[in-house]
Amino acid sequence: MKKVLCVIYFVSFFYTCSSGNVKQQEVPSGFNFASYLPSSFEEIIKLTDGVDAEKDHGLSIFTNKYRIQMKWTEFPKGISKESLGSAQILSKFINLDPRYVALFKYELKMKVKNKNFTLLFQENLVPFLHQEVKKGDSIALFVFFGEYNTFGKEHILFVNEFQTGTR
């Protein structure tokens, strides 16, 4: 009797698995714009002002994803050794795949309210920026806020995507 039940169980199991009832999980294709929270450079400054108030010097790590609307002022240039080093250090702290960090080959340094920001751009984005964006245009940057360095008072953001226009 046990053998018959085992055979029935395995036959029904294999029939169920092969009949299409078991569905493969669909992985959405494309960039997930909705996973980035609306924010601003000023909001990031407020977040890190609290870090400065603690007077605990060092590297503060964040893993927030933001959509930041801004007026475009300048195009990124090749990444500096310092910025690349910061990105590599961050990748070790939060276990980022080194291949992800290697995508970022350009940087844009800027100041907002006398605070330093370094925006690291994926290499594949820069040609599209030059084609689609002019200085003074409104643009949304989809960034991963990686770190704030209290020694240099520098915010480092990884730019993963952009959209032109106001959204």
Image (spheres, grey):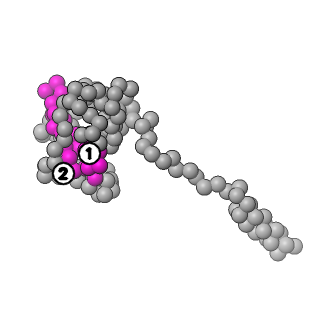
Q: Residue at x 51, y 47 (%)?
A: 28
Q: Is residue 25 left or right of residue 99?
A: right
Q: Residue at x 17, y 52 (%)?
A: 85
Q: Amino acid at mark 1?
A: Pro
The residue tagged 1 is: 127
Pick the front one: 42 or 30: 30
Report if the CB atoms under discs 2 and 1 are less than 8 Å apart: no
Magenta residues, as a range?
103-126
Q: Disc count in the image?
A: 2
x and y, in percent, of residue 117 in the image: 19, 35
- In reply to whether residue 61 is colored magenta, the answer given is no
Question: Dividing the picture into quarters, in which one does residue 150 lie?
Answer: top left
Work out how far the residue at label 2 is from the one at label 1, CA to CA, in angstroms. 20 Å
Pick the front one: 81 or 47: 81
- In reply to whether residue 112 is colored magenta, the answer given is yes
The residue tagged 2 is: 84
Q: Within 10 Å of the Cα at label 2, are there few (<14), some (14-19), or many (20+) other Cα atoms?
A: some
